[in-house]
Image: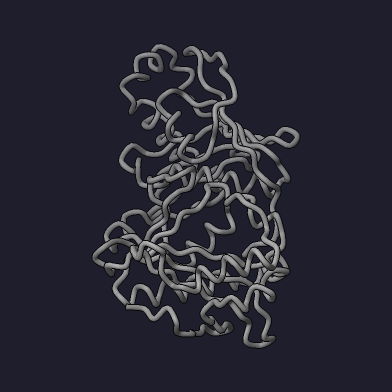
Amino acid sequence: MIDLDQSWRTERLELEPLTVEHAAELAPVLDDAALHEFTGGAPLAPAALAARYARLAERRSPDGHQLWGNWVVRVRGTGMAVGTVQVTLPAGGPAAGPAEVAWVVGPQAQGRGYAKEAASGLVALLREAGWTVIAHIHPAHLASQRVARAAGLSPTKEVLDGEVRWALPSAAAAEEAMFVIRAAAPGDMSALRDVFRRSSLSNDGDRANLLAHPEVLELSDLAVREGRTRAAVADGRIVGFATWLAAGNVVEIEDLFVAPERMRQGIGRALVLDLIAIARGHGARRVEVTANQHALAFYQETGFVVDHQVTTLFGPAPRMRMDIAPATGGA
């Protein structure tokens, strides 16, 4: 069992158990509304933060069912506190359920890898103690997703209160799911068209309409030539792709296709998150997509909401959106 009252360290950081006395030091570090953009709430005044830390310092929930581990993230070279990491554990031990981790680093210390280093260290300690590890992250919180990936977590298909569950994959699942996303090149067109056609025809409900309009099964190379296509590649083979188009402060997802044999393995979600990162980099405030009925649940799980209905060649379809914030410093 991990010792919740024990300090530990990483290459650059000292992690010390949280106490009520830390509230005065951390209140100004965490006094930024941007830290609550994806989690809700607002910064706490020192007195309210002290009251919260007093509860957390008990290391156990009032009903005794959970154990709470909270540590201050301190930079050894400067002695400055820059944030916290936390874990919630079932009191029954690893057999009773997973350990859920979370982290926060103040804006002034972001972009230096502290969150990645602290979270990776905590996950490593938990794994050594026999725990499985999870985290819940908003689908638009790209900085937190980068921290989770650095700690070895991967997104799952489970969504709780609008947040995606991330978990340590099994060795077999990690090997199967391994892929990279890169910009597509003109030489990829044959592979992209193959994925486009096979994916389009893989749904029984769409096949008849598509075959009756063969022109819609032709994939133009315009988005590739203009640098607007992202390809997911596994074992040197394209297994999915997405295209996007920017107009003002809106980025539209034009295409999203995954090879049928690689569906439901996180590739589509990863491509969407990749486009959201691109949109934020362009200063966009919203990402939009016209979804067919088969993809409606997928986009909702990824954080999109229905805005209105539009008319397409094959009938009405939901026009969906996700409001995003422009890119800021990473964790």
**Quadrant of the rendering where the N terminus is positioned:** bottom left
Give the residue at x 50% y 63%.
102
Give the residue at x 55% y 13%.
311
Could you say which quadrant of the image residue 63 lies in?
bottom left
State whether residue 7 is above or below residue 321: below
The residue closer to the viewer here, 290 or 68, is 68
- Tell whether 42 sits left or right of 55: right
- Tell whether 178 sits left or right of 34: left
**Quadrant of the rendering where the C terminus is positioned:** bottom right
State whether residue 204 is above or below residue 151: above
Question: Residue 25 location in percent, x, y?
Answer: 69, 76
The residue closer to the viewer here, 4 or 132, is 4
- What colour scheme was applied to this rendering of the protein? one colour
Q: How many marks?
A: 0
Question: Residue 115 location in percent, x, y?
Answer: 57, 69
Question: Residue 296 location in percent, x, y?
Answer: 45, 28
Residue farthest bottom in this picture: 77
Give the residue at x 69% y 50%.
281
Give the residue at x 50% y 53%.
137
Residue farthest right in this picture: 248
- Tell whether 194 sits left or right of 24: left
- Tell whether 311 sits left or right of 286: left
Question: Residue 191 location in percent, x, y?
Answer: 43, 40
The residue closer to the viewer here, 192 or 75, is 75
State whether residue 313 is above or below residue 246: above
